[in-house]
Image (spheres, rainbow, N blue to C red):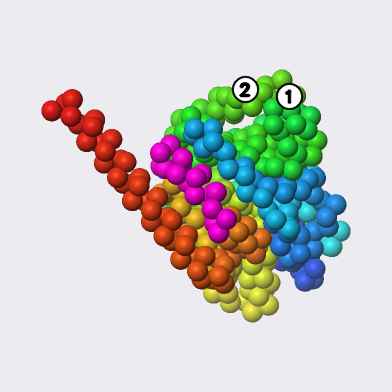
Amino acid sequence: MTEQFDAVVVGGGPSGATAANDLALAGVKVLLLDRAGRIKPCGGAVPPRLLKDFDVPLEQLCARASSARMIAPSHKAVDMPVGDGFVGMVDRDVFDEWLRQRAVSNGATRIDGTFEALERDSDGTAVIAYRPKGAPRGSERVKVRAKVVIGCDGGNSAVARAALPAHEKVPFVSAYHEVIESPPEGFNGFEGGRCDVYYQGNLSPDFYAWIFPHGGKTSVGVGSAVKGFPLREAVAKLREQVGMTDCETVRVEGAPIPLRPRKRWDNGKDVVVAGDAAGVVAPASGEGIYYAMTAGRLAAESAASFLKTGDAAVLKQARKKFMKAHGQVFLVLGIMQWFWYRSDNMRERFVKLCRDPDIQQLTWEAYMNKELVRKRPMAHVRIFLKDTGQLLGALFSGGRRNNSAATPAE
């Protein structure tokens, strides 16, 4: 006899744990299948809106950042104070587990195991085959039936590979970080309330590196979409650069981070994906926790509607609602990443732009509220003019370099 669930959620990160919790609260018989011990490399930054939207207590924050520092290739730094608010910092090791335990306390069944296959019963019902934690590879699989499946199993989602169109290849950044014991306050300029972002080509040729304090621990990491770029060596270089080589390393993690949302999140039958499996990591910033939890909630809503109506078309609502709320932000951030991260010359100009008070205020307002800020139209006009000036300057300086480089060859 194969156990029957209304819903099976594969993956217990913020997205999957949120989906399982919401479904359990709605009275759905839900299984949360999580590959225990897997932690995604993550800076751990969350906006205050996340705490409100998902009823997360302040006690889950291991630190609060009051500013960010952007470091250019020339090592010139620009501080961006948050103002009256703060950026919450979580340790994914602790935070993710709290989310999973909350789902269980609200009625979800939790099993630690690895998803291996999506099969079908003779009547077409989805069957999830998994290997329990500790079972050796090749051992007999355990199987459960599900009326609906939610895949929240990361950027390299096995559920997505099993159920969604195979032709869609989502571009991704490879991320790697080392969680270290935080140095003393003031050590080589270290501040426990400041997130440092390094826009330097030697650390990442197309993304950025970071140092994000988590109270007693600190995440030091880097991301890049360039195949073969030595991420570990880049982190070692950054730690040496800031004098953190001797800080004890607590753990290391690596994972692919998607760069754009999937064009399709459901299979038109009984499967929908969310979180990194759906590609909801913000371009340019790499922020993913809030968007993952939002996508998990929307996937749970669509799954619950499907269970009530039997209409598979409602599964499409998860992506539709997400893109309506956040698609424009993702588009703007994608353009920013493509434009500003392409060379050290452009990164230098980007960091210089961050000095602007209008840009700082609108950036933080958009981050805190998770939407583009449409008020203060004159500030947008000023930013547009400044961006245009930087663009023309980049084109002009690039042209001069090209001309001067061409002269000897002639």
Badge 2 is on which residue?
240
Q: Which mark is residue 78?
A: none
**Left or right, residue 377 beside residue 365:** left
Magenta part, dominant SS: helix
Q: Element at badge 1?
A: loop
Residue 319 in view here = no
Instruction: Tell me the magenta residue range.
Output: 341-359
Residue 396 is situated, as x and y percent measured from the top left of the image, at: 30, 45
* Image location (x, y in percent) of residue 219: 69, 36
In this rendering, is residue 191 above or below 104?
above
Q: Earlier in the sequence, mark 2 or mark 1?
A: 2
From where the camera sits, is residue 208 visible?
Answer: yes
Instruction: Tell me if residue 349 is in the magenta stretch.
Output: yes
The residue under label 1 is: 247
Residue found at x 84% / y 62%: 106
Q: Quadrant of residue 257?
A: top right
> What is the residue that sits farthest to the bottom in this orientation?
309
Closest to the observer, 216 or 174: 216
Furthest residue to the top?
Answer: 246
